[in-house]
Image (tube, grey):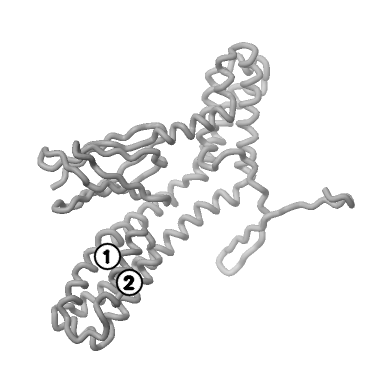
Amino acid sequence: MLNNGVNIWLIRIFIIFDETKFYFMAIPDLNIQCRIGELPVLGSFLITTLQANSTAISGVYPAFDAAFITQANTDLAAIEALINPSQLTGELKVITRRLYTNMDVVLRDRLTILEGYLNQATGLTMAVKDFGVSNVRKRIAMNDVEGASSALNTLLQNVAVVANMTALTAKGYTAAQHTANVTLRNDLKNDNVAQNTKMNDRNNLVTVNVAKFNLFWTKIKSIADAGKRVMKITTPNKVDDFTMAVLKRRIRQERNNTRMNGVVTAGGVKVKDAKIEMKPLLGGRRRTGKSKASGAYEILSMEPGDYLVSVTKSGFLELSDEVTIVTGEALVKDFSLV
């Protein structure tokens, strides 16, 4: 409130598009005091602990009865569905898998072949290093889909110059190969747009349902408050089980303990310096590790979720698999290279 007595209300506006129409929707502030991904975890902890101590707590505060617990679990399921909607999540995984395959496998292989033609060709209009192959590789290494698509476009424009196509064709590069490379560029561009759209759709589910998140936060805060008050008198050693700050520290500590480890072998022999790369299927940063002389590897402090894992070592075929990382757990995964 200002000194002149005028109330100032801060309202965020969200624009909803519906075919050719759009309308404005006022979005309240998100008033939860934790990370959005921690909300369902905190809720689950508190509801479960309330249920385990329901007799003591509802005996003092009747509002926290069996019906309250049932509704709280229903609300929890709804919050989890908004944060991780099954259909959008499944669609996003399909797109992301395809992007990883096209970027990390197909495009890398195509670049290797095309660079070979460039090295063999004579009469090119520019030096091989100026065609842009290295820039595409750089963007792949950075996991920059948009940048890789743009760099690939520049490379293919240089290749398409008549004199260059003539020189490359003489060494075996075909119109069909060029068309396939153009198609790959378009696929990368389209999938990048589709991936961003799906991520935005997931984020918008949270944005337009802020009121539900706030209500759920208020509900679990009331559980924490009632639980602490009753436990302080009846069972002091359980007070921490209803203390938000303590629960958040536990969640974050569990995330620190979340890891994947195992051993890389080839024909029963331990493999040193194999690269293990973890690629998240729902967004986030990649994680990498290397195997030691014992073949053992370990990747620590993983974010929970689904990952595409690739294991590479010079002289061996690349190995890939999908894994699910769970908060607070160590996933043991061994790999055998060929």
What kind of element bears circle 2?
helix
Q: Which mark is residue 152?
A: 2
Residue at 64%, 16% (x, y): give it.
230
Q: Please give left or right for residue 323 compared with residue 314 in the image.
A: right
Marks 2/1 in contact by CB < 8 Å: the verdict is: yes
Residue 257 image position (x, y, % from top left): 40, 33
- Residue in front for this viewpoint, 111 or 122: 122
Q: Quadrant of residue 215?
A: top right
Q: Please give left or right for residue 151 compared with residue 74 in the image.
A: left
Mark 1, residues whose alpha carbon is within 10 Å: few (<14), some, or many (≥20)? Answer: many
**Amino acid under disc 2:** Leu
Would you name the residue on which mark 1 appears? 107
What kind of element bears circle 1?
helix
Above or below, 156 against 313 in this view is below
- Residue in front for this viewpoint, 109 or 142: 142
Q: Please give left or right for residue 36 compared with residue 262 in the image.
A: right
Residue at 18%, 79% (x, y): give it.
174
Q: CA distance from mark 2 to mark 1?
A: 9 Å
Q: Please give left or right for residue 266 compared with residue 326 in the image.
A: left
Of labels 2 and 1, earlier in sequence is 1
> What residue occupies the far right of the structure in this picture?
4
Mark 2, residues whose alpha carbon is within 10 Å: few (<14), some, or many (≥20)? Answer: many
Above or below, 273 against 182 in this view is above
Q: Quadrant of residue 325?
A: top left
